[in-house]
Amino acid sequence: MSESIVVLMIGISTLLGAIGLLALIWAVRTGQFDDHSKFIDAVRHDNEEDLQDAAMMEERKKAHKEKMKQERLEKERNYRPAD
């Protein structure tokens, strides 16, 4: 490939990247990604069983993490290097 084609490709890709970045900044500033009804709809469709399931899952994660931590500490305490 000639040098001029490589320079042209780099220039065009930089220009397209800048246009994409400007479009993203414009969309964020004008509120294109805002969803004001998201939280209202989420609360409307939640029920008590789903909330209890979520709380139970969090407790299980914490218990599992604590169990893994205890096992790791137990292995470290019982570690004996090879003679």
Image (cartoon, rainbow, N blue to C red):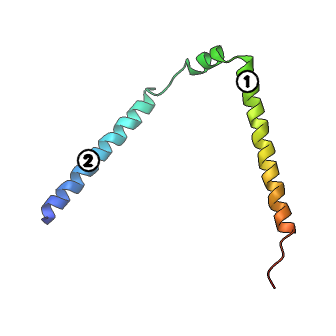
Number of the label disc, if any, that sits on residue 34:
none
Name the image quarter holding the N terminus. Answer: bottom left
Residue 52, image x and y in percent?
76, 25
Query: What residue sits 78% from the left and 46% below the top?
Result: 64
For this orientation, the residue located farthest to the top is 44
Number of the label disc, if any, that sits on residue 51:
1
> What element does badge 2 sit on?
helix
According to the picture, the residue beneath numbered tag 2 turns out to be: 15
- Is 61 drawn above or below residue 55 in the view shown? below
Q: Nearer the viewer, residue 30 or 56?
A: 56
Query: Tag 1: Cα neighbours inside 10 Å, few (<14), some, or many (≥20)?
Result: few
Residue 20: which quarter of the image?
A: top left
- Is 56 drawn above or below residue 68 in the view shown? above
User: Which amino acid is tagged 2?
Assistant: Leu
Query: What residue sits 84% from the left and 76% below the top?
Result: 80
In the image, taking residue 42 as reference, residue 62 lies left or right, namely: right
Looking at marks 2 and 1 on the same chain, the residue that comes earlier in the sequence is marked by: 2
In the image, taking residue 56 as reference, residue 29 lies left or right, namely: left
Query: What residue sits 20% from the left and 55% below the top?
Result: 9
Residue 28: which quarter of the image?
A: top left
